[in-house]
Image (cartoon, rainbow, N blue to C red):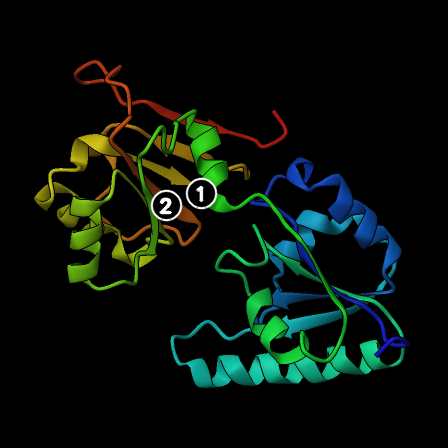
Amino acid sequence: MSDSGTLYGVGVGPGDPELLTLKAARILQSVPVIAYPATPQGSAQARDIAAQWLTGQREIPITMPCMLDRGPVNEGYDAAAIAIAEELADGRDVAILCEGDPLFYGSFSYLLQRLGHRFPCVVIPGINSVSAAAAAAALPLITGEQRLTVIPATAGDGLLRQTLLASDSVAILKPGRHRPRLLELLRETGRAGDTVYIERASRSGERIVKRFADIPATPGPYFALFLVTRSRPSTESPGIAHESSRSPRE
């Protein structure tokens, strides 16, 4: 194992390349091999974020089908683990790129399960989507003794309802097609006035909607989230939507 390469889990942040850490940039420039999740069509957002730091390394795309069935997804991780293990066994370091933070709903977690017991591993944390969204909206997530709960939009209504009623602050991730259902739950639990909706935090096309009535009751993008906070200041005026759209380079 001492002669093997090191497996790096590199968080590349939420989307803005300037939010990549200095350590992540150094590792990306030094490793001979990188791997990253990719769609069957070849889109790879983690690679796009890190592109300026890549210097001709060997690349291993990890093709992930867009489906709820875990069978084909696990097969993709299995195949990637075999290819990455071959590189590591030959003494070459491999950096696996992961949007946000590698261990915060990160795809790297599944490869760590397959490879972490066999090879040296170093994880480079990244800025996660919750922190990026709060920063974009200039919204304190929690203060003092408050509690924050992070939950995916795919959780059942009962669990989401319980979370909204019990937690001071809630981040609901990846609403996508679940957005209409989430809006109903937020109304039902009395949290509509605590809600800010953010799309594509730190990315091109970032959008922040601070007035609940202006959040579309239709399916929305995958890269979005709801932040529900009891500490949200009451600064809105009736009839005014607080919304922003900017480029991450501004």
Q: Specify the quadrant of the image occupied by residue 56.
A: bottom right
Q: Position of residue 70 (x, y in %)?
A: 43, 80
The total of numbered circles placed on residues is 2
Residue at (19% x, 46% y) in the render: 166
Secondary structure found at label 2: strand
As drawn, the label of residue 143 is: none
Residue depicted at 28% across the width and 26% down the height: 231
Horizontal relation, residue 128 to residue 196: left or right: right
Taking 43 as reference, is 161 above or below it?
above
Q: Is residue 62 left or right of residue 205?
A: right
Residues at marks 1 and 2 touching, judged by CB atoms closer than 8 Å: yes
Per the image, label 1 sits on a secondary structure element best described as helix
Q: Earlier in the sequence, mark 1 or mark 2?
A: 1
Would you place residue 99 above or below residue 130 in this image?
A: below
Q: Quadrant of residue 55?
A: bottom right
Quick one: which residue is furthest to the front in this view? Answer: 145
Dot 1 corresponds to which residue?
Answer: 130
Q: In the rendered image, is residue 63 in sight? A: no
Looking at the rendered image, the quarter that the C terminus falls into is: top right
Q: Amino acid at mark 2?
A: Leu
Regarding residue 132, the answer to whether it shows in the image is: yes
The one nearer the camera, 127 or 153, is 127
Q: Residues within 10 Å of mark 1 (few under 14, many from 20)?
A: many
Q: Amino acid at mark 1?
A: Val
Q: Position of residue 247 (x, y in %)?
A: 56, 31
Q: Percent position (x, y) of residue 49? A: 66, 48
Name the residue rendered at 26%, 57% in the picture. 178
Instruction: Name the residue at 88% across, 75% down.
Output: 2
- Position in image of residue 224 (x %, y %): 40, 46
Quarter of the rendering containing residue 83 = bottom right
What is the quadrant of the N terminus in the image?
bottom right
Disc 2: which residue: 225
